[in-house]
Amino acid sequence: MSSIDRENSLLMYRLKRQLEELMTKEGRGTELVSLYIPPGRPISEVMNNLRQEYSTSANIKSDRTRKNVQAAIDRVMQRLKLFRETPPTGLAIFAGAIPQGEPGSERMETYVVIPPEPIGISYYGCDAHFFTAPLEELLKEKDTYGILLIDSSGATYATLKGRRLEVLHEITSGIPGKHRAGGQSARRFERLREMELNDFFHRAGRHANELFLSIKDLKGIVIGGPGPTKYDFAKGDYLNYVLKENIITILDTSYIGEQGLREVVAKAGEIIRGVRHLRERELVQYFLFQIGHDTGLATYGEGEVREQLEKGAVKTLLVSEALGLFRVFVRCSSCDYRETFTVTKRELQAFEMKIQSTQCPKCNASSLTIERSIDIIDELAELAEKTGAQVEVISKETEEGEMLLKSFGGIAALLRYV
C-alpha cells in the first residue's frame, strides 16, 4: 500500500491554515491585491510590471480606493525586494487594507506564501477578496489511481486523478452465458466455462499489467464489478505482484463499462480519503502499541514531547491538525524576565490584552510585552527539524486521529531509543 509523502502532511497543513486566514479577509472595494509568480520568472520583470500597475492605479477615481490600492502595491513590492529570485515552487503575495470596523479603520495586511508545489500561473489582480483559487487547487487530490471493472463478460480499464476519469481500454471475454449448450452435460459445460474464465482472467491481468505498471507514481488499484467474479480475479495470480499488493479496495458496482465507472467516481472521495488516512492510522496504531506495551519508545503530552525533542530522542512527531494551540513568548522590558505560555487560538487575543495590564512577577513593573506567538505545531516542528525528526500532522477524521486528540492531547512522539 502506498503512503503519503512524509513531509507532505506538514506542508499541506501550513498551506491549509494560510488559506483559511486569507479567505476570511474582505476589503471595502476592489482594493485587495493578489500576485502570483511562477517558478523561473525574474523578480526584476515582476517589479517593472508592478511599477506600471502603480502608475495605472493613479487613474482610479475614488480617493480612498486609489490610496489603498497604491499602498497595497507598494507593500507587495517591499516584500518582493526580500527575494533575489523566485523560489523553486513560485511565490504568492497578498496585500490590502482590511477593515477593522467603521470606514477609516482599515489596517494594511500582507501575506507571503511559498507554495509546497510549483504553481504554473502568472497573475496580478485587485478585488474585494484575495484570489486564492490557484493555492486551493494544490490542496486537491492529484494522485492517480487505476480502476479495473471486471465480470465474466468483459473488463474495463481506467484511471482516476482527482475527479478526472480517463478510460484506457475495454475488452470482452467471449465466454458464453451460464445456460448449457444442447447435448453437453452440466459438469462438462461448467468445466469448459471455468477454463475459459481462467484464460480470460490471465488476459485481463496482462492488460492491467501493461496499462497500469507504466503509470508513474500510481497510488493504488481499485477493482470493481457486479457479482463475485471480481473477488475470484483479485485472489488469483493474474496481476503483477506490484499491482496486487496495491489493491486498495474492491467495490461492488452494478455494471462494468461507463455506468460502472460512474459508480466508482461517485465513491472516489471515500476511496481517496481512505488511502490518505491509512498512513495516519498505521502511525497512531503503532504509537498505541508502544504505549500499551510500555516499551518506553513512545510518549505524549506537550511537556514530555518537548523535552524529548530537545534531547534529540524523537524519531517521529505526531500532532493533531485540530490542536489549535499557540506558544506565546513574554518578556519584561524592564528586567528582561521571560516566560512562555500555551494558549488556545480562541484565548490568544484576550491573553494579549491581559498581558498589557499584568505586572512582571520579578520586578513588579507593568512592562510585560509579547515578543512573538507561534502555532505550536510550527514551534514543535522547528524543534523536530533541528534533530532530523519526522513530522506527521494527523487529521481527526479517523477513529485513531480522534483518539490522539482527545485521549493524548493531540501531541505525541515515537522515540529513537529508551
Image (cartoon, grey):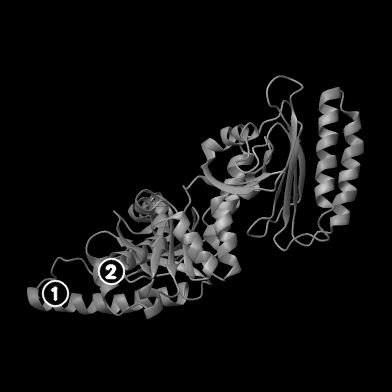
Q: Which residue is mark 1?
A: 190
Q: Residue at x 52, y 69 (%)?
A: 311
Amino acid type shown at disc 1: Glu
Amino acid type shown at disc 2: His
Pick the residue in front: 206 or 134: 134
Q: Residue at x 84, y 35 (%)?
A: 71
- Dot 2: element: loop
Q: Residue at x 25, y 78 (%)?
A: 198
Where does residue 144 sit, x and y in percent of width and height? Answer: 49, 63
Q: Is residue 5 visible?
A: no
Where does residue 75 sit, x and y in percent of width and height? Answer: 82, 42
Is residue 378 shown left or right of residue 175?
A: right
Where does residue 341 sit, x and y in percent of width and height? Answer: 55, 46
Nearer to us: label 2 or label 1: 2
Pick the residue in front: 288 or 263: 288
Report which quarter residue 277 is drawn in: bottom left
User: Against 266, is 360 above or below?
Assistant: above
Is residue 357 shown left or right of residue 163?
A: right
Q: Which residue is mark 2?
A: 293
